[in-house]
Amino acid sequence: MSVDYKEGEHSNLVTSEFHHIVGAAFFIYSSMIFYFSGTGNSKWLAKQVSREQGEQLVFIPDALRETDCSFSLKEGEKIGFIFPIYSWGPPPIVLEFIKQLTLMNYGDHYLFFVCSCGDDIGLAKEVFEEAIAAKGWNCNAGFSMIMPNNYVLFPGFDVDSKELEQKKLVDVISELVKVNEAIASRTNVFLCKKGGFPFIKTRIIYPLFCRYGIEPKKFYATDACVGCKRCVQVCPMKNIEMAEGRPVWKKNCTSCLACYHICPKQAVQYGKITVKKGQYFNPNI
């Protein structure tokens, strides 16, 4: 049975599986697909993989909000990471989670990742492998899945046309069948689209993005805001609060853009860069 741990929710099933360890303030979980998502592409992928593989889901921001990120592995259990690509690399929150993550009883467990991207992923595979290698784990498989674009904070970057958006959403279904078959058979395979100039994209642009491109200060709400609080509710980091009927952004932002894309009035803006740009939120979420 798949359990989706949404922001702020506490599953009774998971709570029943928590075990206090004497003298230590952390919990043991038994769910082995960890995911992060802002506008829903990776969340949709996580749900599909979870259902087909019979694994439960853990939402990474929720896990980080717990006292400690310790998980007990069952024998033969698969370990999955599902996340979007941020400027040709994994989201920093995913890398931070891996640093804090403890996998108890880790042995020859099959470990894989699935990442959603608008086109290509550069050397994101290598960055992910470096992160888990630092923990003493081995990555057995990885897959990049082309899905609709949502990044709009760079000049020239915008969402896809509705026609291309629909095509990507249709095409990914058959690709996901292949991915699930490979995971189910524990195949050692990497099907990742690096694209052109991967070194420049991931080793130069990606670090600059992580350092300077994740900045909540430029977010604001225009007079079109109706105070519906959807941006507050969708924020995976719980980084937005209401003040005098308007959203206010705090410092703990991942630049997932969920707040921008979910706004029914397109009142959420980021400086002047998002003016007249489109919105996208996965329609299946």
Image (spheres, grey):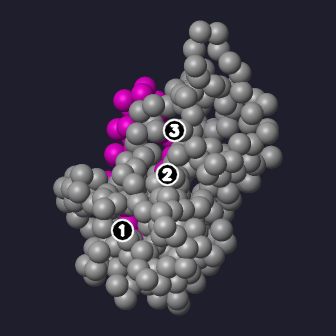
In front of the other: 116 or 36:
36
Task: Name the residue that disc number 2 marks.
Answer: 237
Q: Is residue 48 left or right of residue 266?
A: right
Q: Secondary structure at mark 1?
A: strand
Task: Name the residue that disc number 3 marks.
Answer: 64
Task: Name the residue that disc number 1 marks.
Answer: 219
Number of labels in the image equals 3
Q: Is residue 3 left or right of residue 278?
A: right
Q: Which circle, 3 or 1, is nearer the viewer?
A: 1
Residue 18, horizontal then vertical, whole percent:
71, 27
- Quadrant of the drawing holding the C terminus: bottom right
In front of the other: 273 or 166:
273
> N-terminal of the two: label 3 or label 1?
3
Q: Which circle, 2 or 3, is nearer the viewer?
A: 2
Residue 56, horizontal then vertical, whole percent:
70, 44
Categorize mark 1 by other alpha carbons within 10 Å: few (<14), some (14-19), many (20+): many
The image shows residue 67, relative to residue 60, as above or below, that is above
Q: Secondary structure at mark 2?
A: loop
In front of the other: 123 or 66:
66
Categorize mark 2 by other alpha carbons within 10 Å: few (<14), some (14-19), many (20+): many
Part of the protein shown in magenta: 118-145
Question: For residue 156, which numbered disc appears in the image?
Answer: none
Residue 207, horizontal then vertical, whole percent:
24, 52
Q: Is residue 185 left or right of residue 266?
A: right
Query: Tag 3: residue type?
Result: Leu
Query: Tag 1: residue type?
Result: Phe
Categorize mark 3 by other alpha carbons within 10 Å: few (<14), some (14-19), many (20+): some
Say if the magenta span includes residue 13.
Answer: no
Q: Secondary structure at mark 3?
A: helix
